[in-house]
Structure formats: structure tokens, C-alpha cells
């Protein structure tokens, strides 16, 4: 393993990091940039806990090497709101609906919803369910999350 | 970072600290008794006894020995304190389980945090109110009847004069204990209890604040990984450390103790790569294989194991009727299922100057400290365990084990914070599962369709092997140079939770048969209640049909408790006033959790397609948990309980081969995904006059039976074996 210097754009800022280019993006975001939004859940692209946006599309940061994102713009949960004091409408709706229990999967659900609403501002129930297929929640908070996402489109 | 002790905070200004006399008479059931799962062996060693502290700025700090695991306990506890002291929620800080700061409340388990911890805080807050009013009355030379108290101030009703808590305390640090005469605020005056106060931690999580133990970061923190054996019973013969260090020259440390093998690195990904490398470059001897069981053969295998038999219920006269052949019989099976936390277990440890500091999402910081003390042969007072929220665990998962891993690694690498998060494979293959169970009810009906005789046999492994001071229950301790093993039985009693039906049946026997099965097992949400209620309530559906009765009427015929009847009747009204699409069927079930906690009746509606594909469309619950502290919290727990239980029931089964567990990720152990989740609706029957009852596990059992009964009423196939999706096709 050898490290190289890489530049990545995260939440609108360019960061220079020293890392093995094969390092999954998730560890760079969490350990180098100290971000809390994306979380390790499986490392296998099965659960969605690590979801971030790459040029606006939801991707699994646990399964993409950092060197593959140097030409893109990455957005994490920390970067979706307009400013540090406010929440994105999806975040706001999740808080209003109290759409979480333990909240470990919350990052994935919110990021997947942000990406979905960007492509489809008025998704129906089925489209929401199908689109969030890749996000696992073990507490059973999905029913509330669906309500929250519908609220945003309304 | 050395954790501050409570006493350091209050050096300079006045304060009022309220505790309970440990030798005193319990004010209400549960406060000082065991967790309901295993005997509380550690409580008496506690010297930290404060539940509540009035701070100089008029704010309030509340101490709970419980941990937040997504159940919203932090909010509920703040609500009861806010109520009794008339304070805004923002002025209340809740300190979670911490061996240096909070009372010892053993485990956060058994749906008991409201019943015990929140009620302790409520009484301490009510007592603090009385105490502050007394002190203020003396100072203002008036009677307490003329005073009001709100947000850290006390004032006179007839003039504008107010005094702050700080004035009242006058720089004194007062420590007091709750006595028996404490008066709670009357029901009519309550403004916060019973309100759907939103959880601040949900805002924090949505806003990406560092809420979890997984988010802890310390200066110069290092990352570790542990290489688990290929089987439960295995010894490490050889690990190629030379090749490892050639490949990863920047590794800080390789820790080997017997067959326990770990790596530590500055960079997390390096530790992960080193862990993967070692998996391929170590040799092990497997000393004991798992049994070779053909597909579908698990119930027969488990029944063939030696068992410890006991009759736990014996009412009326069963033996006289036994010769009769008119018994209706059925046999049900529930497989091993897993907790399956979405975030694999994680802990941080620091060993410095003979002291070990631990950050963990364990459900029991005090029992864990005692157990670590045994594993490490270290005095308990040198170990400091702080509870930090983790991913939802739903029982005893890998939380204690990963902490034991970290304790071993931190001691081998002193002076730095060592962080370890398990891999998905670690979590799936090494957590302790909920036991498989076989349930065999039989019953006789009278001519009028009433149950006259009931006999129930259950086969199960233990339902709790929480550490509880026994180092042999910590996974890494099995593999140390001097291995520690556990030959005790654990908490078999959990198997018979809800084994006795809550119905009036004159002649009844319940027999338990305890085996030691092949897999590692421990407490999973509801313990035996999930499988017992699945079996009993499925069987009630079978009996109702035999008796020619409607499933609602049949249950009501056998219920005496008016609160039980009310949840069933309310559910009946709800489902009969809803229109259901053509081709769907309804199933219902009822139980009172533990036969002494929350009442819950659940209905499920399914559609079954030609190829036996089950679509679970909607679930309804009516729940009575006594006085509701936070109705939205109770709804959230009940909605989630139904969805999780439906996932267990339809999809889940831990599989294994002769080597080890083969359910190793979310593909080999699938759970509900978004497109499979039903709509849910929860109705609460609030009883402000009654004590609050544990509710977090109340939905698990009835949800299972409601789904199974709905399948039968839709397609005519009786579900006797879980998971439904697999066995309905066989």
C-alpha cells in the first residue's frame, strides 16, 4: 500500500488528502475529513448507510475508491442544506415526522430521498419504495420515512 | 481525555443533588430489582447514587443508568423531570449510563426503562421541587402554598418577588435522598407528560451531528481490527506476521494472545486490509464442528438433544383428560434469528496509567465493567465505562464483545485511543442469536366452543447470556492464551415468557424443555415471547375455526381483563370500519406482554399471489401501555416493532453448515427492504391514572401471529413454520 496526494471536492470545497488511491471514499470522508453523515454499515453496497451524492446521484461511498471521484463533486449529509444554520427540506421533513428510531440509517434514507426528488419532484408511494430499495432500516422506521418524503413533494 | 467526575462539576457553586437510599424501600416496582432478564448482581457495588442535580444556573442535569438505543428514553426521562419541576425541555441535560456518573441500573432491557428509570427520575424531580419550595419558603419567610416554581425560579403568588435556584441554595451543596412522602404533580396539572415532545436527537442525527459511538474522534486515535476464527471452536496455529509486516510496514501493532489476533494502525483502511490479509494467511485447527443438518431438519435435530424438563404452569386437572383423544394439536417452529444491527458494533478504549477508559454502546455499562475486570484481571475501580448511543441493537448483540476486543487491544497498546468497528461479516457471523424454538400446544373445546383444557410444550435454548460478570460470555475471552468459557445456563426463564396464555382456561399445563443448541445465543427483543405468542395466537385462530367462531369473538369469550378486552374490541372496530380490497385477508392476534406489561392487539392484511408470494399491505395496532409519557415515542416503537417482527416472520432464518454460520451479509440473511414494508397505523389507549407499562417489545409476538393468520385467511395455508416466505412454498 502506498499513499498519494489526491484532490477531492466535497460539499463545495476542494480538499487535498494523502491516501492509498484504492481507499474507499467512505474512510476518506470519515477519517480524513471528519464527516459524520456517511456511516459504515456493510462495506458491500448492500445497506446504503454510507450513501453520498456524486454529481447529484446517490452512490455507495463504501464501495468506490477515492481515486474514482477526483473529477466529480461529492455532497454528504453535511452539505445538502443551504447553510450551516438551516436544514434541507428533506432533513426538515424527517425531523417533523420523527422519522427515525436509532437513526443509524438516517443518512442513507435522507440522501437517497434528496437524489430521488432531484430526478422526480413528485414521486408516488411505489416510486419512493422502489427508489429506497437499497437503504436498509432495522428499527422499522420506513413507514415514517415514506411519510416524510411525501411531505416534501407536497 | 480523562472523564470528569460528577463531583468535579460542583466544586464552586451551590447545587442540590437528589438520590435514593439504596437500602430504602422501593417506591414502585422495578427500581431496585433485577432487569427482568438476569439477576442484578452488580447493583450493590455502586457508590454513585444521584439521579438529579440542580445546577447553579438553574438548569437541571438528570442521570440515568439506561442507554439510548433508539427507543427515545432520553426524551421521556427529560419529560418527566420537566413536568415535576416546571422546566423547559431545553434546560434539561440527560446523562446516560456511565460508571463514573450515573446510578447502576444494570441492563437497558425488557422494556423497563420507563417503568424503572423514568419513574425514579420523576420521583427525584418531585422531591427536588418540594425541597426547593421548602428552602425558598424559609428564605422568603412565607408558606410553600404561596409559592410557584418555574424554569429555575421560585416566586411569590401575590407579589413580583422571585428568587433563583442559585439564591435559594446560597452556595451550599446539598445532597439528599427521596423519602416516601414525595407527591407527584396531580394529573390535571400535567403539561409535558402525555405530549408528543419531539426527540432532539433525531434533529441532531438528521443534521449530521456526531451522535454515535461510531463518531467519536480523539487526537491521535488509532484503528484496530480483529481476525475472527473460521469456526466457534478453533485454535490459531500460525499467523504469518513477517509477510504481514512486509505488506503493511506502517502497522503499529499486531496483538496476539493465544488465538486472539488483532491489528492496529493509524489509518482505518490499512487495518481493514491487514485483517483481510490475515484471514488468508493464518492457519487454524477446528476442534469441534457444527452438526450436519439437512435443509428443513433443524426442529427434529433440536428435539433430539438432551433436555432439561420442567412444568412451569399446572392449573386445574389435565391428567384426567389426557387419555381422551379429542385434543386439537399443532406444532410450530421458529428458527434462529439475528439482531442484525445496521451499524456493526463499535467501541473505543484508552489504557493509560493503569486506568482503562471505555466508550461503548453496551446495554449494561456496570455489568460490563465487572466482566471486563474479570477478563483483564484488573481492579474494577480502574475501569471506567461510558455509554454512548449506537446503532439499534434490539437486545444483546456484538456490543459487549467489541468492547472486550477493544479492552484487550487498548491494554496492549497503551496511551492512545483505540477504535474498533466490526465488519459486516463479524457482526452477522458472531453475534449471539435469538434461540430457535419448538412450540406444541394442544387443547380441548367444550360443546359451546370454550377451551376447557390446554397443554403446551416448548423446546428452547437459553434467552440471555449477557456478560453479567462472567468473562466466559465475552467472545474474545474464548480465544485467549488462558481461555475463559461459560458453562452456565444463562437465563432459560426467558423461554417461557408469555408461554401461559392470557386467557381464562380452567385446566392448564405448560412444560418447558431446555436444550443447549449448536449456535451462540442470547437476548433478542421479547425473548421467548415472540415465538410463544406466534404459536399461541396462531393456535387460537385454529381453535376459533374449529369452534365455528369469529377470531375476535373467540378471544373475547376467553378474556376477563377489561383492558385486554378493550384493545381487542377497539381493533375490531378499526378493521371492520375499514374497507379491504378484493382478494385480501385479515389476521389478528392479541397479547399482554410478559402477562404484566402493555396490552397490544394487532391486525394484518395480506394478499397472496399465485406463486405464493405474500404482499403484506397493512398492519394496525391498538396498544394500552398505561400512562403514556410520550405518545409519539410509543407509536414509533409500536410501528417499528410491527415492521421488524413482520420481517422476522416472513423472511428471516440464520443458516449454518458444519464449519460456521453461512448467514454472513444482507444477501445471505435478507431482511425487509422499503418495497416490502407495510403501511402501519397505531391507536393508543392512554390511561393517565394507571402506572406506565413497558411497551418496546409488546408488538413483536402479536405482529407475527397476525401476519401468519392473515396468510391463512387469504390462501388457506396454515403457517406452522417460520419464516413464512420459505416454508409456504415447500
Image (cartoon, rainbow, N blue to C red):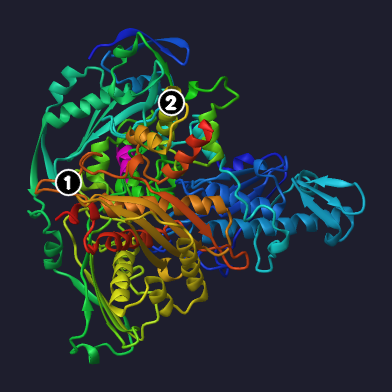
Q: Nearer the viewer, residue B344 or B501?
A: B501
Q: Which mark is residue A120?
A: 2
Q: Position of residue A69 (x, y in %)?
A: 33, 13
Q: Position of residue B476 (x, y in %)?
A: 25, 44
User: From the viewer's perspective, is B178 left or right of B588?
Assistant: right
Indicate the quadrant where residue A10 lies: top left
**Circle nearer the viewer, 2 or 1:** 2
The residues colored magenta run B401-408
Q: Please identify the dominant SS of the magenta region.
A: helix
Q: Secondary structure at mark 2?
A: loop
Q: Nearer the viewer, residue B328 or B257?
A: B328
Q: Position of residue B349 (x, y in %)?
A: 38, 36
Pick the quarter of the image with the C terminus of chain A.
Answer: top right
Chain of the residue under label 2:
A
Pointer 1: residues within 10 angstroms few (<14), some, or many (20+)? some
Residue appearing at x 14%, y 45% in the figure: B231
Quick check: B491 above or below B408?
Answer: below
Q: Secondary structure at mark 1?
A: loop
**Residue at the right extreme?**
B159
Quick check: B505 above or below B726?
Answer: below
Residue underneath mark 1: B661
Residue appearing at x 42%, y 42% in the figure: A142
Amino acid at each position: 500500500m502506498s499513499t498519494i496526494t489526491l484532490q477531492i471536492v466535497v460539499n463545495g470545497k476542494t480538499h487535498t488528502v494523502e491516501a492509498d488511491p484504492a481507499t474507499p471514499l467512505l474512510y476518506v470522508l470519515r477519517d480524513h475529513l471528519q464527516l459524520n453523515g456517511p456511516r459504515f454499515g456493510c462495506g458491500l453496497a448492500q445497506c446504503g448507510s454510507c450513501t453520498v451524492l456524486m454529481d447529484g446521484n446517490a452512490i455507495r461511498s463504501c464501495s468506490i475508491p477515492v481515486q474514482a471521484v477526483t473529477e466529480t463533486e461529492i455532497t454528504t449529509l453535511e452539505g445538502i442544506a443551504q447553510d450551516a444554520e438551516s436544514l434541507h427540506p428533506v432533513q426538515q421533513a424527517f425531523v417533523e415526522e420523527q422519522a427515525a428510531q436509532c437513526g443509524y440509517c438516517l443518512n442513507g434514507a435522507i440522501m437517497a430521498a434528496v437524489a430521488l426528488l432531484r430526478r422526480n419532484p413528485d414521486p408516488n408511494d411505489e416510486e419512493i419504495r422502489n427508489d429506497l430499495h437499497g437503504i436498509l432500516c432495522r428499527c422499522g422506521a420506513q413507514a415514517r420515512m415514506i411519510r416524510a418524503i411525501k411531505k416534501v413533494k407536497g | 481525555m480523562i472523564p470528569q467526575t460528577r463531583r468535579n462539576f460542583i466544586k464552586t457553586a451551590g447545587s442540590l443533588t437528589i438520590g435514593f437510599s439504596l437500602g430504602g424501600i422501593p417506591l414502585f416496582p422495578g427500581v431496585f430489582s433485577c432487569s427482568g432478564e438476569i439477576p442484578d448482581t452488580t447493583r450493590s457495588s455502586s457508590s454513585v447514587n444521584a439521579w438529579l442535580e440542580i445546577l447553579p444556573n438553574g438548569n437541571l442535569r438528570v442521570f440515568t443508568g439506561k442507554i439510548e438505543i433508539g427507543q427515545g428514553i432520553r426524551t421521556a426521562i427529560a419529560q418527566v423531570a420537566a413536568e415535576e419541576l416546571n422546566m423547559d425541555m431545553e434546560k434539561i441535560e440527560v446523562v446516560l449510563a456511565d460508571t463514573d456518573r450515573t446510578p447502576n441500573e444494570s441492563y437497558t432491557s425488557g422494556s423497563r426503562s420507563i417503568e424503572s428509570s423514568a419513574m425514579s427520575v420523576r420521583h427525584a424531580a418531585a422531591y427536588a421541587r418540594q425541597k426547593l419550595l421548602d428552602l425558598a419558603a424559609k428564605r422568603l419567610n412565607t408558606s410553600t402554598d404561596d409559592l410557584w416554581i418555574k424554569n429555575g425560579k421560585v416566586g411569590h403568588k401575590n407579589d413580583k418577588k422571585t428568587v433563583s435556584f442559585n439564591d435559594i441554595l446560597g452556595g451550599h451543596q446539598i445532597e439528599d435522598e427521596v423519602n416516601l412522602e414525595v407527591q407527584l404533580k396531580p394529573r390535571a396539572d400535567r403539561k409535558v407528560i402525555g405530549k408528543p415532545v419531539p426527540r432532539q436527537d433525531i434533529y441532531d442525527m438528521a443534521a449530521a451531528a456526531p451522535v454515535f459511538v461510531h463518531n467519536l474522534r480523539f487526537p491521535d486515535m488509532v484503528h484496530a481490527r480483529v481476525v475472527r476464527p473460521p469456526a466457534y471452536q478453533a485454535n490459531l496455529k500460525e499467523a504469518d506476521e513477517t509477510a504481514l509486516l512486509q505488506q503493511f510496514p506502517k502497522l503499529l501493532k499486531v496483538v496476539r494472545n493465544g488465538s486472539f489476533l488483532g491489528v492496529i494502525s493509524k489509518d482505518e483502511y490499512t487495518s481493514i486490509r491487514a485483517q483481510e490479509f490475515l484471514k488468508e494467511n493464518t492457519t487454524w485447527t477446528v476442534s469441534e464442528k457444527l452438526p450436519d443438518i439437512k435443509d428443513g431438519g433443524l426442529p427434529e435435530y433440536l428435539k433430539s438433544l438432551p433436555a432439561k424438563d420442567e412444568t412451569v404452569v399446572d392449573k386445574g386437572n389435565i391428567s384426567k383428560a389426557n387419555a381422551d383423544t379429542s385434543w386439537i394439536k399443532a406444532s410450530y417452529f421458529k428458527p434462529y434469528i439475528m439482531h442484525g444491527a445496521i451499524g456493526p458494533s463499535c467501541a473505543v478504549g484508552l489504557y493509560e496509567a493503569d486506568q482503562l477508559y471505555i466508550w461503548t454502546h453496551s446495554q449494561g455499562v456496570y455489568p460490563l465493567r465487572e466482566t471486563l475486570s474479570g477478563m483483564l484481571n484488573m481492579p474494577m475501580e480502574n475501569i471506567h465505562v461510558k455509554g454512548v448511543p449506537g446503532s439499534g441493537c434490539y437486545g444483546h448483540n456484538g456490543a459487549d464483545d467489541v468492547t472486550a476486543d477493544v479492552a484487550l487491544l487498548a491494554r496492549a497498546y497503551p496511551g492512545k485511543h483505540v477504535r474498533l468497528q466490526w465488519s459486516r461479516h463479524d457482526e452477522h457471523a458472531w453475534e449471539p442469536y435469538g434461540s430457535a424454538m419448538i412450540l406444541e400446544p394442544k387443547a380441548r373445546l367444550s360443546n359451546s366452543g370454550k377451551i376447557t383444557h390446554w397443554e403446551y410444550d416448548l423446546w428452547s435454548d437459553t434467552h440471555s447470556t449477557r456478560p453479567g460478570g462472567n468473562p466466559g460470555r465475552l467472545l474474545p475471552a474464548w480465544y485467549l492464551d488462558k481461555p475463559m468459557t461459560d458453562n452456565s445456563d444463562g437465563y432459560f426463564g426467558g423461554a417461557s415468557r408469555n408461554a401461559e396464555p392470557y386467557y381464562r382456561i380452567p385446566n392448564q399445563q405448560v412444560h418447558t424443555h431446555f436444550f443447549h443448541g449448536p449456535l451462540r445465543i442470547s437476548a433478542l427483543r421479547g425473548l421467548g415471547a415472540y415465538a410463544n405468542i406466534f404459536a399461541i395466537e396462531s393456535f387460537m385462530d385454529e381453535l376459533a375455526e374449529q369452534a365455528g367462531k369469529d377470531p375476535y369473538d373467540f378471544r373475547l369469550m376467553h378474556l376477563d381483563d377489561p383492558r385486554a378486552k378493550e384493545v381487542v374490541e377497539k381493533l375490531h372496530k378499526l378493521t371492520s370500519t375499514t374497507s379491504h380490497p378484493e382478494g385480501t385477508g385479515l389476521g389478528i392476534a392479541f397479547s399482554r406482554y410478559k402477562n404484566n406489561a402493555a396490552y397490544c392487539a394487532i391486525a394484518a392484511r395480506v394478499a397472496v399471489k399465485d406463486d405464493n408470494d405474500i404482499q403484506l399491505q397493512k398492519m394496525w395496532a391498538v396498544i394500552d401501555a398505561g400512562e403514556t409519557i410520550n405518545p409519539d415515542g410509543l407509536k414509533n416503537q409500536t410501528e417499528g416493532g410491527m415492521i421488524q417482527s413482520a420481517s422476522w416472520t416472513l423472511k428471516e432464518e440464520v443458516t449454518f453448515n458444519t464449519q460456521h454460520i453461512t448467514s454472513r451479509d444482507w444477501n445471505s440473511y435478507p431482511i425487509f427492504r422499503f418495497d416490502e414494508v407495510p403501511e402501519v397505523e397505531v391507536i393508543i389507549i392512554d390511561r393517565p391514572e394507571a402506572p406506565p407499562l413497558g411497551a418496546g417489545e409488546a408488538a413483536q409476538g402479536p405482529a407475527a401471529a397476525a401476519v401468519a393468520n392473515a396468510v391463512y385467511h387469504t390462501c388457506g395455508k396454515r403457517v406452522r413454520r417460520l419464516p413464512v416466505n420459505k416454508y409456504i412454498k415447500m
